[in-house]
Image (tube, grey):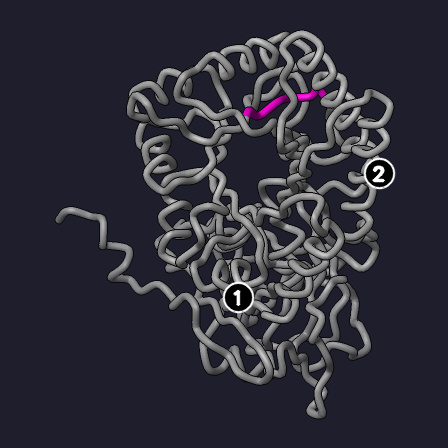
């Protein structure tokens, strides 16, 4: 799925999402503009929830996109939430997210992070030994905080090096291979302010090949068998992370949410049966797979530069300030001409941003119909990790965000102003 589920070409021949004409949205709200299709968000949430059923819990990973207006839609679909900072927790609380469904992850948590998790009643996912001491200073004597431990299973999936997290050489989690995971479990079980309810792992992001997840499941289940044998401990919950990839180009063929969930449940059931273990609840954490396909980015074309025999640059009014992924990960995108998405393609063009960096390129050598200054371009699959990593580089205000549904658009984040750039400055 490259475009939102409600996408169609309307009677005017233009792109439409959620019943809203994208050219008209660009005119009304200006560009760059991020547009989220509510129906796609709900459909993706439901695919995960229905596939998992009563076997566990689905958490949405807020780092993909954590605007309160977006989180309210996710919460309404019954998903839990994982946050990785006090700031993300603050946004979740502003959205009214049920605190008993919030998990606080992340490495190198501060005392303030741990205190915020305790005050909110969230489940804390411990990622390093220093957090045991922080819990002593935060949780009152006689009280206990629901906690899980993040394990590193020593698996590197088929993905970009920068978004692989489950290998031995990683800043995340307690390594099973090194023995740190076993030591962490023993310490957690002996800690008088921890209620150890689960173990968690996450091997990486934008994963198409599920064999890494299945291999990680085997390693974790072997670890569980050792814990039961030596410590008499079996966790209530087992987190397998998220990381399911999405389509960014027409050629991408990621597994569906149902295929992802079914593969993990099958591996869990077969592994549990072979080892005679108690079956834990399976916890999954999709982020990109929920938000990514639901969002499109709209830009207005400005300068067009031809270099004969080399390349045609089409410059737009956004770029690396609102989407750092091409520069950071070498991410690839498609692009569509919003007024004529099915028009005959001219020779490929390269879409450049307006930031003062030569690498500020959103998409290279993409086929588009003939493009003119003032046209609106649409980049699909822009719903995850674009706005959440956006910046004010070059003094550029960050874009507005609208949610569309049944022909109505509602602003869920206004465009920043130049005054916003001064909000934290002391003159």
What distance separates the C-alpha of mark 2 from that of mark 1? 37 Å
Label 2 SS: helix
Residue 366 point in image, percent of width and height: 74, 61
Q: Toward the viewer: 347 or 289?
A: 289
Residue at 82%, 49% in the rendered image: 259
Residue at 75%, 22% in the rendered image: 221
Disc 2 packing (10 Å; few <14; some 14–19; many ≥20): few
334, above or below 115, in the image: below
Q: Is residue 10 left or right of residue 23?
A: right
Q: Residue furthest bottom?
A: 11
Q: What numbered label is drawn on residue 34?
A: 1
Q: Toward the viewer: 23 or 344?
A: 23
Q: Toward the viewer: 410 or 312?
A: 410
Q: Residue tagged by mark 2? A: 266
Q: Which residues are magenta?
A: 149-154
Comparing marks 2 and 1, which lies closer to the viewer?
Answer: 2
Label 1 SS: strand
300 in the magenta segment:
no
Q: Magenta residues: mostly which secondary structure?
A: strand
């Amino acid at each position: 799925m490259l475009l939102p589920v409600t996408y169609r070409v309307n009677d005017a021949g233009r792109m439409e999402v959620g019943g809203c004409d994208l050219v008209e949205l660009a005119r009304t709200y200006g560009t760059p503009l991020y547009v989220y299709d509510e129906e796609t968000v709900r459909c993706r949430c439901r695919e995960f929830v229905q596939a998992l059923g009563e076997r566990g819990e689905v958490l949405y990973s807020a780092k993909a996109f954590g605007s309160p207006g977006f989180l309210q839609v996710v919460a309404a679909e019954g998903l839990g939430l994982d946050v990785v900072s006090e700031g993300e927790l603050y946004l979740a609380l502003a959205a009214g997210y049920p605190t008993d469904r919030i998990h606080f992850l992340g490495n190198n948590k501060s005392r303030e992070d741990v205190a915020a998790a305790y005050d909110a009643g969230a489940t804390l996912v411990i990622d390093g030994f220093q957090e045991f001491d922080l819990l002593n200073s935060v949780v009152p004597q006689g009280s206990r905080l629901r906690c899980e431990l993040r394990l590193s299973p020593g698996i590197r999936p088929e993905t970009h090096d920068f978004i692989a997290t489950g290998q031995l050489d990683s800043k995340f989690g307690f390594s099973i291979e090194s023995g740190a995971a076993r030591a962490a479990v023993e310490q957690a079980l002996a800690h008088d302010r921890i209620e150890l309810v689960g173990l968690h792992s996450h091997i990486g992001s934008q994963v198409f090949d599920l064999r890494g997840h299945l291999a990680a499941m085997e390693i974790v289940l072997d670890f569980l068998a050792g814990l039961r044998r030596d410590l008499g401990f079996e966790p209530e919950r087992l987190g397998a992370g998220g990381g399911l990839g999405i389509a960014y180009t027409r050629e991408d063929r990621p597994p569906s949410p149902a295929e992802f969930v079914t593969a993990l449940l099958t591996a869990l059931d077969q592994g549990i049966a072979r080892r005679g273990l108690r079956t834990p609840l399976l916890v999954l954490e999709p982020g990109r797979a929920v938000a990514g396909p639901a969002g499109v980015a709209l830009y207005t074309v400005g300068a067009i530069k031809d270099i004969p025999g080399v390349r045609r640059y089409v410059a737009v009014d956004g770029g690396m300030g609102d989407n750092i992924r091409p520069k950071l990960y070498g991410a690839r995108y498609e692009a569509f001409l919003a007024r004529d998405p099915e028009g005959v393609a001219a020779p490929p063009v390269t879409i450049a941003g307006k930031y003062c960096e030569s690498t500020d390129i959103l998409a290279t050598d993409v086929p588009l119909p003939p493009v003119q200054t003032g046209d609106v371009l649409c980049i699909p699959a822009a719903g995850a990790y674009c706005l959440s990593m956006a910046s004010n580089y070059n003094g550029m205000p960050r874009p507005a965000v609208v949610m569309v549904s049944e022909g109505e658009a509602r602003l869920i984040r206004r465009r920043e102003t130049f005054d916003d750039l001064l909000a934290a400055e002391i003159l």
